[in-house]
Image: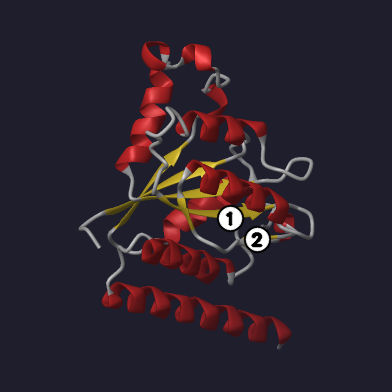
Amino acid sequence: MPETFTVLGIVGSLKKTSFNWKLMRRAKAVATEGITFDVFAYLGVLPYFSEDREGERTPRMIQDFRQRIESCDAILVATPEYNGSMPGVLKNALDWASRPPGESVLDGKPAAVMGASPGRYGAARSQADVRKVLTAIGAEVLDRELSFPRVHEMFDDQDKLLDLETGPRLAGHLAALIELAGGATPAEESELAEYSRTCQQLASDQRVAEAA
């Protein structure tokens, strides 16, 4: 892996206190040394995609968004589920990133998707749609989902994470993304695996303590 491996986080919710934002921040927190997170927080100000605004008329903020995708080593998308699919602002951003034809900054870019929702499926349908769109654009998409159903039960009233298994699940997803990108050395993969085992043991100890 290069000295610094950069993951660009993209959250499909505009609500800054959303559970998907909380999980993205948690993913950033569990990232091992050498992994840098650059989270894009401006989906809501991107204009609607229009071919009339391409070429020399491409808005500066779209150019900046594409540059951040181009500069990263991989992307991690966190999506809620609205009416059985991804939010419109996320689809709009991906449409902009897919252009111009044949020159998309997402072409060949390693990408992974995760999602959370208060329902029992954890934004599984939304994640499937995001992976489908990313694949159509040409990204190299991790063929697995990471779902967090009933996510509102994972945090207390002070937004403290109660589910100790979330950390290792996020770490495992990141490890798979880095492996997809061809950026992890065997030693680094071992380090992530050890972290995952440690978190799982902590979760097990916590369950035992609560049952006592």
Furthest-front residue in view?
A: 102
Residue 30 relative to residue 155: left or right: left
Please indicate, yes or no, whether residue 196 appears anywhere in the rendered image: yes
Q: Residue at x 38, y 62 (%)?
A: 178
- The structure's colour scheme is secondary structure
Residue 22 relative to residue 85: left or right: left
Q: Position of residue 11 (x, y in %)?
A: 55, 42
Residue 143 or residue 188, whichever sits in front: 143
Task: Say which mark, if any, is on residue 171.
Answer: none
Q: Position of residue 59 (x, y in %)?
A: 42, 16
Q: Residues within 10 Å of mark 2 (few under 14, many from 20)?
A: many
**Which quadrant of the figure contains the N terminus?**
bottom left
Q: Residue at x 54, y 62 (%)?
A: 143
- The amino acid on which the numbered mark 1 sits, given as a three-letter code, is Met
Label 1 residue SS: strand
- Residues at discs 2 and 1 in contact (Cβ within 8 Å): yes
Q: How many marks?
A: 2
Say which label, 2 or 1, has the lower sequence index: 1
Quadrant of the rendered structure where residue 192 is?
Answer: bottom left
Alpha carbon separation for disc pair 2 and 1: 6 Å
Q: Which residue is mark 2?
A: 147
Q: Which residue is mark 1?
A: 114
Quadrant of the rendered structure where residue 65 is?
Answer: top left
- The amino acid on which the numbered mark 2 sits, given as a three-letter code, is Ser
Q: Residue at x 54, y 68 (%)?
A: 169
Q: Position of residue 109 (x, y in %)?
A: 39, 48
Q: Position of residue 171 (x, y in %)?
A: 46, 67
Q: Residues within 10 Å of mark 1 (few under 14, many from 20)?
A: many
The answer to whether 158 is drawn above or below residue 173 in the figure is: above
Furthest-left residue in view?
A: 3
Label 2 residue SS: strand
